[in-house]
Amino acid sequence: MPDLGTLLREKNIIFVTLGLCLVFYLISPRFLSLDNMSAISRQIVPIGLIALGQFFVVVSGNIDLSMGMGSVLFAIVLGVFFGITGGVGVGIVAVIVASLALGYFNGTLVAKLKLPAFIVTLSTLFMAQGLSGLIIPRGQQIFLMGGFFKFIGAEKFMGLYWSFLFLVALFVLAYVVYNHTRWGAYVIAIGNSEENARLAGINVDRVKTGIFMFSALCSGFAGIILSSRMGFVQPGLDGNGLLLDGIAAIIIGGTLILGGRGTIGGAFWGVLFIGVINNALNLLNVEDVWHQVFKGAVILAALGANYVLWQSRQAEAH
């Protein structure tokens, strides 16, 4: 049974998130209302999907900057195919194919050609942003109407949005894969030392390509859910803001930016942390110009606390 000090070090993101909830509740009792908690569960879904895909990429010692704008591009792909065919299924298949193709492209350049993931995914970020504007001219919209989009964007089960339940299910599946399969062990091994992983017989190129394909698939899911929630698609959406929130979530949740360490549970709590901050800033009517300043300060404080606790854990281990 761990003592309180150990529990605080290992699960600090939980205590920090719950502490923030208490602070915001004292400022505005509406914060912990059932309606607002339900709203947070809906708002965090795209961030959570981006964070989950990014988690595996970062643990492997890489980065995927294309996920945010990729989600915007995939939302537009969904809208275009839905508009042309009138079939939701065709649009979803198109998103899945397009996302896996982008992930394979990124993964191949990083794994086979040994190009830096930062440069490769920065390039595909710009490509996704440009393609979004080419497919749908700026200022135009495609409206998404029908039962599927209403179900994904607004329907609930026992007070929780179906999209949030999908996110939880995906995190549970990712937990099993990460902690109880060889593939998860391979991801960690590559993040710790790619050369040692090769010497151990791991097909590093194939695993890295698979990681980028999963990352892009999560981005595709984010695009589907984001567009369903809005009810329309258009270029110019803030995909990069979504990406930054996703990266911040996993880092706050304890994922080592250099790779090799992180937990699925920590990533999930990091997503909740970002969702709580975003929602509270809107609920408290904080001016938009101060949103990023306040969020940055809180994230920096949380990262500082994580670093101090991690240093304490390392000193205790030695």
Image (cartoon, helix red, strand yellow):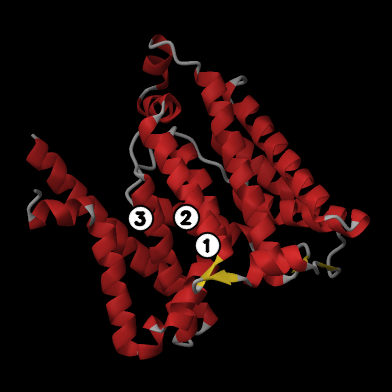
Instruction: Reply above or below: 151 against 96.
Output: below
Query: Could one spot residue 236 in this view of the protein?
Result: no
Q: The residue tagged with tag 1: helix, strand or loop?
A: helix
Residue receiving disc 1: 164
**How far is mark 3 from mark 1, CA to CA?**
21 Å
Task: Tell me the kind of residue under disc 1.
Answer: Phe
**How far is mark 2 from mark 1, CA to CA?**
6 Å
**How far is mark 2 from mark 3, CA to CA?**
19 Å
Q: How many marks?
A: 3
Q: Residue at x 28, y 70 (%)?
A: 18
The quadrant holding residue 177 is: top left
| Circle 2/circle 3 CB separation < 8 Å | no
Crowding near the residue tagged with mark 1, few <14, some 14–19, many ≥20 C-alpha atoms within 10 Å = many
| Circle 3/circle 1 CB separation < 8 Å | no
Residue receiving disc 3: 252
Q: Tell me the quadrant of the picture where the C terminus can be found.
A: top left
Disc with the residue nearer the chain's start (2 vs 3):
2
Q: The residue tagged with tag 3: helix, strand or loop?
A: helix
| Circle 2/circle 1 CB separation < 8 Å | yes
Residue 131's spot in the image, x, y percent?
A: 80, 50
Residue 256's spot in the image, x, y percent?
A: 35, 42
Task: Tell me the kind of residue under disc 2.
Answer: Val
Which of these two is toward me, 271 or 180?
180
Residue receiving disc 2: 168
Crowding near the residue tagged with mark 2, few <14, some 14–19, many ≥20 C-alpha atoms within 10 Å = some
Instruction: Reply above or below: 258 against 4.
Output: above
78 left or right of 178 in image: right
Task: Tell me the kind of residue under disc 3.
Answer: Ile
Instruction: Reply above or below: 87 against 21.
Output: above
Q: The residue tagged with tag 2: helix, strand or loop?
A: helix
